[in-house]
Image (cartoon, rainbow, N blue to C red):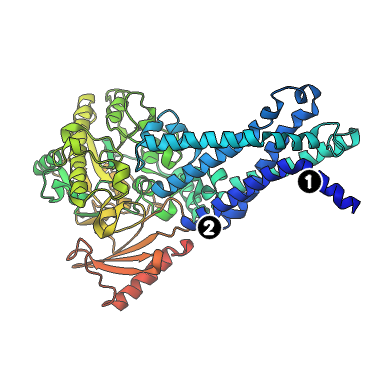
Amino acid sequence: MKRLKSYWTIFLRIQGAIWLASFNFSFSLVYIVVFTRHFNVDPRVIPLHLFLVIGITSITILLSGLPLASESFRNWRLARFATMLAPALFFTILVFLYIADYVSNSFWGGNINYKMTAIYAFRIDELVKELPVSSLWVYLPLAGLLVLIATGFILASGAIFRSLDHFFSRHGAYSLFKGRSRRNKSTVLFAVCMIFFIQYTYILWSQRSLLVDVSREPILGFLVTPSDSIMETHTMALVRLRDKQERQRYPHEQKFERKNVILIIADSLRADHMQVYGYERPTTPFLLSLQEAGSLKRVDQTLSTCAETICGVMSVLSSKDATKLCQQNFTVNDVLHDMGFGTYFILSGAHDWYGLREYYGQEMDLYYDGASSKKNSINDDNTLFEGLEKVPDYTERPAFFYFHLMSPHHLGTKYAEYCRYLPADKKIDPAAMMAGKYGSAELIDNYDDKVTQTDGVIQRLFDALRQKGYLKNSIVVITGDHGDGLGEHGHLGHTNFAYQEQIRIPFLIYDDAGRNYVNLEAANQIDIAPTILDRLGLVIPSCWEGTSILSQRPSEYSYHISSGYRLAFSAYRCYVVVYRTEKETYKYIRSIKGGTEELFELISDPGELRDLSKGKAELVQALREKCQAHYSELGG
């Protein structure tokens, strides 16, 4: 009975610390369970997150209590509040991280990370305006939450202080630091536990997704960029090795045309809304004028490998399927750099957000993106001309340029002079658009304005490059990373679906009028890099998967995916197989969500309105087998 009474006395004295730890654990448990279920995250993230919360909570309690071993600190009149700083700071950061991750997953499909935070730290208004509410309704609740957390910790500070004082002061009967022997044992125990926690956490982080996709866990995910979270499969390891070997043995002593190569990728640019592709509105008058003059070639049907930026851009640069992309891919810019080209990446948008900066590598003469600009907002295409000013005029050294345009994207800055279909006073708010607050007519008008703006930006780029001397002896490729839904099939934006509006893109080539291209019928993103090298007369690396349209007919089969950068399970992932015959082009779509299958014939039904899967069971079975074989490592 005496022992029970003694235990109860200890509990009463340390209940403040117990309630603090219990509250942190319970709060985190509720959040992570709701989070994993709502966003279909691997449930193994739950114990991982709770382990981290318990460990960090214990560390904050330790850091708060250690100063109490000092008599001068215990007698300080503000000691009670000072001991609250570490626990309160950790809990506040955790709550705000939870909110940020929930919002980020709702709108962008992934957790917030340190690079996103660094990019928007001093541009928070640009991020807030993407949310479907006014900035007032963002800042006021966050300020109120901050006051609520501070009030709660102040009210609990007395109980927590007494608990910590009982554990850490040298006078308490059960103090961990009473006497030399107990102090030494406690110090060793704390050191061992902390080393174990830090080492095990580092192992989890360094292994990335071998054990679990840590990018979806809020705390470790903050330290991981999208490019870090690629699943390391046996196939991926072979891709890395093969690309590395191919670059090492690539022949540098080749005779080739020393033309400048200018790659323009417009984010979210759909071919079917471009006048140069037969669209009824005059959205691309400049490009149409080049086509009519005979200097612009058009590939009629081109599909992106995926419906998002990372795999879209990297499939262009590395001629790789979305499932074989990594930071060590042998890219077209690598080839040209090794052949003596100057390489310039001038990009609108913040590419560290996507994790693309690591993919691009360091071997370039200039890297300049939206986060580099001090004059323009991150997604403003005027940044391109700001970056181009830093490029020296053309001499005799050929150059490779990659320009990334944000004009077509719903986040891209829109200029008033291009409000031709949607009046400037009816500006579309990006967040409200994604929340479904506009009709299809308004969305189409807004998008067509942005395509018209894209055409205008490209014309300005041509003029600027001409003035610097790079355009005269050049080949220019204009394409998109993916498309964008405007309400077709009931979907807006991109990433989660793979209908034609999400993956059909332009493929335009500005080249000598007399140059003959064998295949201008159909191509894929992976065919762009081989076409560029073939045009220059350079050897196409054997590790590339695409073919040059200068000399090859379209491939019989091609493979596409909705969301490709994170190769872990995605509830919304769609797998696509396109099968081309002489007269027909079939597109098979397998959706993870609901396990649905669809089959369309794109020549007779470009809008994918008639599902043929019920009437062509044998073809569906054949394409299903193709799909499963190709995406076997992803559970496809």
Instruction: Determine whether, in the image, residue 132 is placed left or right of residue 38.
Output: left
- Callout 1: few (<14), some (14-19), or many (20+) C-alpha neighbours within 10 Å? some
- Residue, x 68% and y 45% (percent of image)? 19
Q: Amino acid at mark 2?
A: Asp
Of the 4 image quadrants, the one containing the C terminus is bottom left
- State the CA–CA distance, disc 1 to disc 2: 37 Å
User: Is residue 554 among the parts visible in the rendering?
Assistant: no
- Callout 2: few (<14), some (14-19), or many (20+) C-alpha neighbours within 10 Å? some
Q: Position of residue 533 (x, y in %)?
A: 31, 44
Q: Position of residue 601 (x, y in %)?
A: 22, 67
Residue sitting at the far left: 292
Identify the element where label 1 is drawn.
Answer: helix
User: Is residue 149 among the parts visible in the rendering?
Assistant: yes
Q: Nearer the viewer, residue 253 or 184?
A: 184
Residue depth check, mark 1 versus mark 2: number of the one nearer the observer? 1
Of the 4 image quadrants, the one containing the N terminus is bottom right
Quarter of the image for residue 333 reads top left
- Residue, x 81% and y 31% (percent of image)? 169
Q: Amino acid at mark 1?
A: Phe
Identify the element where label 2 is drawn.
Answer: loop
Question: Residue 317, labelled with which disc?
Answer: none
Residue 372, above or below 273: above
How many numbered marks appear? 2
Instruction: Determine whether, in the image, residue 283 is placed left or right of residue 224.
Output: left
- Residue, x 16% and y 32% (percent of image)? 417
Per the image, the residue denoted by label 2 is 42
Q: Position of residue 317 (x, y in %)?
A: 36, 44
Q: Nearer the viewer, residue 542 or 463?
A: 463
Per the image, the residue denoted by label 1 is 11
